[in-house]
Image: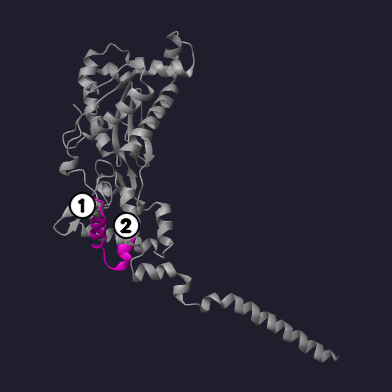
Amino acid sequence: MSQESSNNNSKSSRSQRSRKTLSSITARCRKPLSAILPRRKDIVLKEIYTSSDIDSLCIKLKDLAGNFSSTSVKEWVAQFEPFIDRNIAFLLLDLVQGFSELEIRTFATRKLQDLLYDYLMNQEHIYAAFISSGEAPNEVNFRRWLRNKVITYAQLPQPQDSSVESQFLLWSLYETSVLQGRDASCNSVRKLRELDEFFSSSKQDPKTSALVFMDYTNATGNQLSKCLKVIDRKLDKYPKWREATYVFMYIVEMDNIDVLKSFQVKSSTTLFFSRMLHYQESQILAKLAEYGVSEEEYNEFVLKYCRRSGEEATGYKNSGALTCHHYSCPNNTLPFFWKNNDNWKGIFYGSQTSRAANYRKS
């Protein structure tokens, strides 16, 4: 074989390999867009959920505050147009962070009590008082001592322009689940102590006392800040109680809530069962991205339907939450989930509905 023929065959072989490689690289590019992003096609052109999906979602949401029949869910999502908006709404409803009464009674109250004990057991001045009490230094005795000698469950004071009535509903679950359950050995506690009554009559040493408050939601910190101002005025009247420890417990709390810096007491903290879900959480954006929904499209959707439901903000002070409790939906959640007016009907019961208006346990 001549050198020229050999060179030609080599060039031909390289050319074939090159064409084969190029073909494999470009093959997917010659496919239609619907084959590359089939979910994007679906979310734009039709409803991605079935009647069976709606029924399953109703079962999932049934213990939250809302009307979750298949008809009501269909009517709610029908307010969103076009199909892509309707589908995003359905996906968000499925991703809402919900807290049923059973979950709070069974898990949340117990975790909050454990967090409370952990916090107090790490307070050096409280631990020193326990050691000096003469009790055998073990965790069981320490917890018993905390329950009987240190902890007082107290009422959040009522600010002038904000409601804290939901604390009594949470207290009823906490008291029956924890104080009459795991801690049945402790002194029976039936009511949250009112602060003025406690400050004026208690014989406890403020330096080894912990006042514990509780409520469902601490989102912007605004309500807690108002309560702290009322407590601070009471402490001006009873200044020795600034030496006590103050603990504020919540079912949900948002990140970066730091309103305790200006609260002039010996020690204070907030504790929470779960971090509040924000509508821009990474797992939500990832779920929407599976359907080809960009973050820009999603943000436009949220603002569009906040306005459609009558609000410019994404919840109270732009909280942007995706959370609902068993008794009501906090106004920190995106308003198109709970807002009702002539042009919009929410799927959750808002905190101002008659159903959620009275929580106090007598």
The numbered disc on residue 54 is 2
Query: Is 84 within the magenta?
Result: yes
The numbered disc on residue 339 is 1
Query: Where residue 89 sits in the image (x, y, percent)?
Result: 31, 59
Task: Name the amino acid type tagged 1.
Answer: Lys
Task: Name the amino acid type tagged 2.
Answer: Ile
Q: Which of marks 1 and 2 is in front?
A: 2
Would residue 321 be seen by someone viewing this image from the given angle? no
Q: What stretch is highlighted in magenta?
A: 67-90
* Residue ranking furthest to the right: 1
* 32 is higher (above) or lower (below) than 138: below
Q: In this view, does 8 lie to the left or right of 128?
A: right
* Residue ranking furthest to the left: 342
- The residue carrying pointer 2 sits among few (fewer than 14), some (14 to 19) or many (20 or more) residues within 10 Å by Cα, namely some
Quadrant holding the N terminus = bottom right
Query: Is 137 within the magenta?
Result: no
Q: What kind of secondary structure does the magenta stretch mostly adopt?
A: helix
* 25 is higher (above) or lower (below) than 133: below
The residue nearer to you, when weighing 63 against 362, is 63
